[in-house]
Image: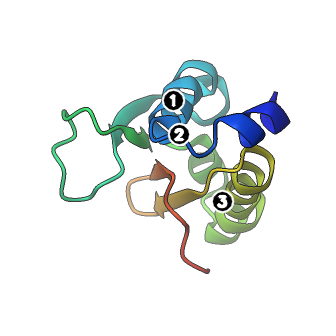
Amino acid sequence: IPFVYKKFCSEWEVTPALLAWFAKLFLPFLVGDMTLTSIDDNADNNNNSGGGLLVERCRVLEGSRCKGVCAKMCKVPTQTFFAERWGVPLSMEPNFETGACQLRFGVVPLDI
């Protein structure tokens, strides 16, 4: 499925919102409870721009309590997976104080 999605759907304007919705539906068992958000920091989270996903208490951060594990075992591989396999950039922004992680589909991540 990823190669078909990458070829035909990765450029759609709604792609970030679709990926966020599917991730919220299928990945809570892996990372924890999630809330759909906006990819725009200045937008009201209740607007319909979508594309963002807030992992409220990331299981990787909570379990490891280690920035290195977060970055090397979760953040970088996940960002690479979505960019290479799905054709959509993903920016993951962990909050080491709260244990939350903001995902922004369609946003190119900053270098570590």
Earlier-in-chain disc, 1 versus 3:
1
**x 15%, y 44%: residue:** 44
**Type of residue at label 2?**
Trp
| Circles 2, 1 touching at the beta carbon (< 8 Å) | yes
Left or right: where 45 falls relative to 81: left
| Three-letter code for the amino acid on which mark 3 is drawn | Lys
Query: In what quadrant of the picture does the N terminus appear?
Result: top right
Q: Secondary structure at mark 2?
A: loop
- At label 1, counting other C-alpha atoms closer than 10 Å, the crowd grade (few under 14, some 14-19, many 20 or more) is some
* Residue 99 higher or lower than 27, as above or below: below
> Height in image: 64 above or below 30?
below
Would residue 2 be found to the left or right of residue 62 on screen? right
From the image, state whether disc 2 or disc 1 is nearer to you.
2
Percent position (x, y) of residue 30? 67, 31
Which quadrant of the figure has residue 36?
Answer: top left
Dot 1 lies on which element? helix
Q: Position of residue 49 (x, y in %)?
A: 30, 39
- Using the image, tell me which numbered label, if any, was put on residue 75: 3
What's the amino acid at mark 1?
A: Leu
The colour scheme of the drawn protein is: rainbow
**In front: 46, or 56?**
46
- Residue 65, by quadrant, is bottom right
The residue carrying mark 1 is: 18
Element under disc 3: helix
Indicate the position of residue 99 as horizontal and vertical percent values: 46, 52
Q: Are marks 1 and 3 in contact (CB under 8 Å)?
A: no
